[in-house]
């Protein structure tokens, strides 16, 4: 062990770092911040003053809600670059969560200030169409990130093949996605030629749908589902098949989520 310029007992180290004695003992037990020495007779812990920066770093990262295993990786990082990369990724996740929280708060305020919304409902006969698709089982919690990756692949693959989609991006969601919080989701783009390599090519069955349009962020889309589903229950006969969402505009078309336009399609009997 390298010699220390000075060491202090655990109580003094606690005062130096604003980490409680209980927390310092816990960090010692899990191997995150080990004392410079432990008295074999009294078991008293002593810490080197050159451990203060590490203790302060740990405290900052805990204030940012970084999990202890990640903090351990930061503390033991072999270079500043690898350490900073771990911290940057955690901050990115925090910013994404903050954005999501703000979106939900805005949705709550709109729900309270505007408890009812006037929707226009209609019927639409959707023809069968050839599509390039990505199909997977997706959880409700992961749907945003999954869609971002899936549509990136879809549009990127078509562009690389010199193709243009024959219509807007869309998706189908099977019932278990709603009832069990996990289910099959198919993200797709209509195409006129063969699907590029790596994508699933299929003919999507047509049918009749009750439709309405949702304008705004996806944080509020449950209200539109509720309105359309209620309309179907009162005025239509349900038909088997997944609900479809057709993204008439989205992040690539308009910068403001308030301007997103999504058509909801609920299968009904012809």
Image (cartoon, grey):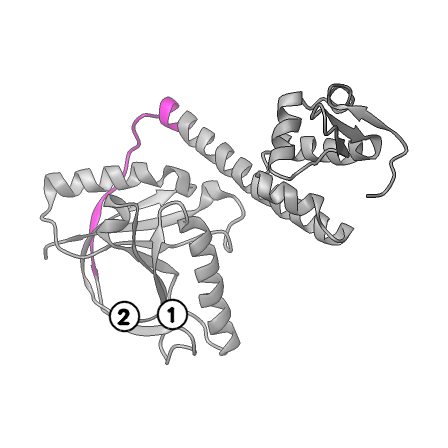
Q: Tag 1's secondary structure?
A: loop
Look at mark 1 in the image and give the residue it sits on.
166
Work out how far the residue at label 2 is from the one at label 1, CA to CA, in angstroms: 10 Å
Image position of 45 with respect to 131: above or below: above
Please tell me whether residue 122 belongs to the stretch shown in magenta: yes
**Which label was assigned to residue 71?**
none
Q: Does residue 254 appear to the left or right of 181 in the view shown? A: right
- The image shows a total of numbered marks equal to 2
Image position of 13 with respect to 225: above or below: above
For the magenta stretch, what is the residue range? 110-125
Q: Nearer the viewer, residue 262 or 12?
A: 12
Q: Nearer the viewer, residue 183 or 162?
A: 183
Image position of 130 with respect to 148: above or below: below
Q: Can residue 95 be seen here?
A: no
Closer to the chain start, of discs 2 and 1, is: 2
Can you give x and y, in whole percent of width and height, for residue 74 in the image? 68, 45
Can you give x and y, in whole percent of width and height, for residue 115 in the image? 32, 25
Look at mark 2 in the image and give the residue it sits on.
129
The quadrant of the rendering that contains the N terminus is top right
Q: Can residue 208 be seen here?
A: yes
Residue lying at 43% horizontally and 78% vertically, measured from the top left: 197
Can you give x and y, in whole percent of width and height, for residue 199 in the image? 39, 73
| Residue contact between numbered discs 2 and 1, judged by CB atoms under 8 Å | yes
Image position of 192 with respect to 53: above or below: below
Q: Tag 2's secondary structure?
A: strand
Residue lying farthest bottom? 194
Please tell me whether residue 32 belongs to the stretch shown in magenta: no
Residue lying farthest front? 41
Can you give x and y, in whole percent of width and height, for residue 17 in the image? 75, 25
């Amino acid at each position: 062990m390298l010699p220390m310029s000075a060491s202090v007992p655990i109580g003094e180290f606690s005062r130096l770092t604003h980490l409680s004695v209980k927390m310092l003992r816990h960090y010692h037990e899990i191997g995150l911040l080990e004392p410079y020495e432990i008295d074999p007779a009294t078991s008293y812990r002593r810490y080197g003053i050159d451990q203060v920066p590490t203790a302060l770093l740990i405290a900052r990262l805990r204030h940012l809600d970084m999990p202890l295993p990640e903090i351990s990786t930061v503390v033991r990082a072999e270079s500043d670059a690898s350490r900073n990369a771990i911290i940057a990724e955690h901050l990115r996740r925090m910013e994404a969560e903050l954005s999501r929280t703000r979106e939900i708060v805005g949705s709550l305020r709109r729900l309270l200030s505007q408890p009812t919304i006037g929707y226009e409902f209609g019927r639409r006969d959707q023809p069968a169409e050839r599509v390039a698709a990505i199909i997977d089982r997706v959880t409700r919690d992961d749907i945003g990130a999954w869609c971002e990756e899936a549509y990136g692949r879809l549009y990127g693959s078509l562009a690389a093949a010199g193709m243009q989609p024959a219509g807007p991006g869309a998706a189908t969601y099977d019932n278990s996605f709603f009832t069990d919080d996990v289910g099959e989701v198919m993200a797709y783009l209509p195409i006129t030629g063969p699907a590029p390599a790596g994508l699933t090519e299929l003919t999507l069955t047509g049918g009749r749908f009750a439709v309405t349009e949702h304008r705004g962020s996806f944080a509020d889309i449950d209200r539109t589902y509720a309105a359309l589903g209620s309309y179907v229950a009162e005025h239509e006969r349900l038909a088997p098949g997944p609900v479809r969402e057709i993204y008439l505009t989205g992040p690539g078309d308009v910068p403001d989520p308030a301007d997103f336009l999504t058509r909801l399609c609920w299968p009904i009997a012809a």
